[in-house]
């Protein structure tokens, strides 16, 4: 199973880690080191994001 999400904090990762535990599978994290400017350009284009990334708060996420 692959889950493609930002999951930038513990609360956003919790459900997926619990699911992996229930299924008896390993959970892995992939970190992409992308240019901050590129991340910001992509983030400001997102609307109604399922990860609760909205335009007014998107600029803070890539900098974490």
Image (cartoon, rainbow, N blue to C red):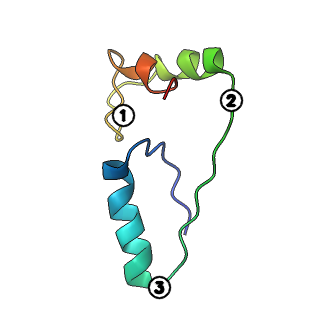
Mark 2 neighbour density, 10 Å: few (under 14) some (14–19) many (20 or more): few
**What secondary structure is marked by label 1?**
loop
Identify the residue shown where x is 36% and y is 34%. 49
Report how far apart the C-alphas of labels 1 and 2 lie in the structure.
Answer: 20 Å
Tag 2 near tag 3, CB within 8 Å: no
Residues 2 and 20: in front is 20
Residues 42 and 60: in front is 60
Of discs 1 and 2, which sits in the foreground?
2
Identify the residue shown where x is 36% and y is 24%. 47
Read off the residue under disc 2: 34
Read off the residue under disc 1: 49
Report how far apart the C-alphas of labels 2 and 3 lie in the structure.
Answer: 32 Å
In the image, residue 10 above or below residue 6: below
Who comes first in sequence, dot 1 or dot 3? 3
Who comes first in sequence, dot 1 or dot 2? 2
**What secondary structure is marked by label 2?**
loop
In the image, residue 27 above or below residue 22: above
Of discs 1 and 3, which sits in the foreground?
3
Read off the residue under disc 3: 24
Identify the residue shown where x is 34% and y is 41%. 50
50 to the left or right of 4: left
């Amino acid at each position: 199973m692959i889950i493609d999400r930002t999951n930038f904090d513990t609360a956003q990762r919790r459900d997926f880690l619990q699911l992996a535990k229930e299924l008896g599978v390993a959970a892995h994290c992939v970190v992409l080191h992308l240019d901050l400017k590129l991340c910001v350009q992509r983030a400001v284009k997102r609307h109604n994001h399922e990860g609760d990334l909205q335009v007014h708060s998107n600029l803070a996420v890539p900098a974490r």
